[in-house]
Image (cartoon, helix red, strand yellow):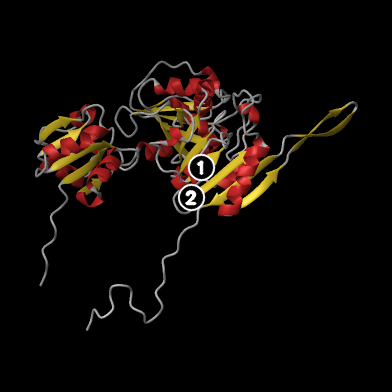
Amino acid sequence: MTRPSPPPPAVAVVGLGADGWAGAPDAARDELRAADVLIGGPRQLALLPPECGGERIAWPSPLRPAVPALLAAHAGRRIAVLASGDPMFYGIGRALTEELGPGALRVLPHPSSVSYACARLGWPVEDVEVVTLVGRPAARLAAALHEGRRLLVLSAGAATPADVAALLRDRGFGPSRMRALEQLGGPAERLTDAAAADAWARPPGDPLNVVAVECRRAPDALRLGAVPGLPDAAYEHDGQLTKRHVRAATLGALAPAPGEVLWDIGGGSGSIAVEWLRTHPSCRAFTVERDPVRAERIGRNAERLGVPGLRVVTGAAPAALDGLPRPDAVFIGGGLTAPGLLDACWRALPEGGRLVANTVTLESEALLADAYRRHGGDLVRLAVAHAVPVGGFTGWRQAMPVTQWAVQKPVRQPVQQPTGVPAAGTAGAER
């Protein structure tokens, strides 16, 4: 017997380009004509012709918190949600999928602005890094600045190209070449001539734009690499800074992976949390610093180095840890002798989580030796010496050695039942 096909999802998510209805394929037009409710931004709704007779509802602001209530208010009706370009690329598709699940949606994408931009510029898409500034601070762009890289910046509005130029100048990338690509794919499409960020003086243009950047670093700008161990000069600090070589070793032991959460305790200048975040844009970090002056300094370092999403908690651990999301890794760079801190961090870690603690004092070193005895891991001493002038010659100046304990919380293996022995509670079940 042939089973009837399941009904189509109640919510269609339809991508539109700058060319609006004229560029919509037949499948997208059919969905929009058949919808009882049409939800989108005012600009997108204005692109629809009268033959799309559904009730038109503009998204409120802020958008994300309104999604559940708006969908619930029209449950049982056929809904079409309008999106710009590809709804699953920095679009409304993500919020709808998180709210309803992928099975409740039918997504009809349109070419994204990134695809159009790369086609116009002759840039292979796979070689381009995309940074969105829609609803996000412009400082995020700083983490993507590397000599020779090509960037596409998704703009928040007409002022974004000027904001990008200002950030490039401030971060030592003033020679970078920029273009604004407006209304891509539409009848009003316009590409500005290329100009250096140092010389960018164009007035605001169309708010629907993408900024293309070819990164060029100024000769005197500090070079920041893509791996942990940035130069110490990259940070504003008062001496409370995990120095470059120890920092690189510490991040290696912490082993950040995409999407993971770090607790950085005793933040100092925030260097460990900053470089954790720079490894991948989906990483998150919370740094705990009891000194308000240092806490403000951490925020400035995070913004300047392109990770303004770093959360700074002003307070003393372990009390300040209450309410933080569970960490995948913990770094303790200060406050080790605070009663209960090390044990609180160990309890907070999930199985497989990592803990790294650094110290230069004998008192804290004794605590780490005891923790190593109880939990295992690696206990190492890191010693770094720098060449310095000694009269007319050169000698070594030894920095204070750092004792580091790095450990991974054990993963408990499930109990294996011997072959032929029934699990507890099943004996005699088939008598």
Q: Does residue 313 appear left or right of residue 147 in this picture?
A: left
Q: Amino acid at mark 1?
A: Val
Q: Residue at x 60, y 51 (%)?
A: 372
Marks 2 and 1, how far apart at CA? 8 Å
Q: Is residue 251 visible?
A: yes
Give the numbered dot on residue 353: 2
For disc 2, the neighbor class at 10 Å (few under 14, some 14 to 19, many from 20) is some
Q: Nearer the viewer, residue 321 or 371?
A: 371
Q: Quadrant of the C terminus?
A: bottom left
Q: Dot 1 corresponds to which residue?
A: 330
Q: Earlier in the sequence, mark 2 or mark 1?
A: 1
Residue 29 lies, with reference to residue 420, above or below; the image says: above
Quadrant (top left/top right/bottom left/bottom right) for the N terminus: bottom left
Residue contact at pointers 2 and 1, CB within 8 angstroms: yes
SS label for mark 2: loop
Give the percent coordinates (x, y) of residue 377: 59, 53
- All told, the count of numbered labels is 2
Residue 333 or residue 347, whichever sits in front: 347
Q: Mark 2: which amino acid? A: Gly
Q: Residues within 10 Å of mark 1 (few under 14, many from 20)?
A: many
Q: Which residue is located at x 38 percent, y 18 percent?
A: 204
Q: Residue at x 44, y 17 (%)?
A: 202
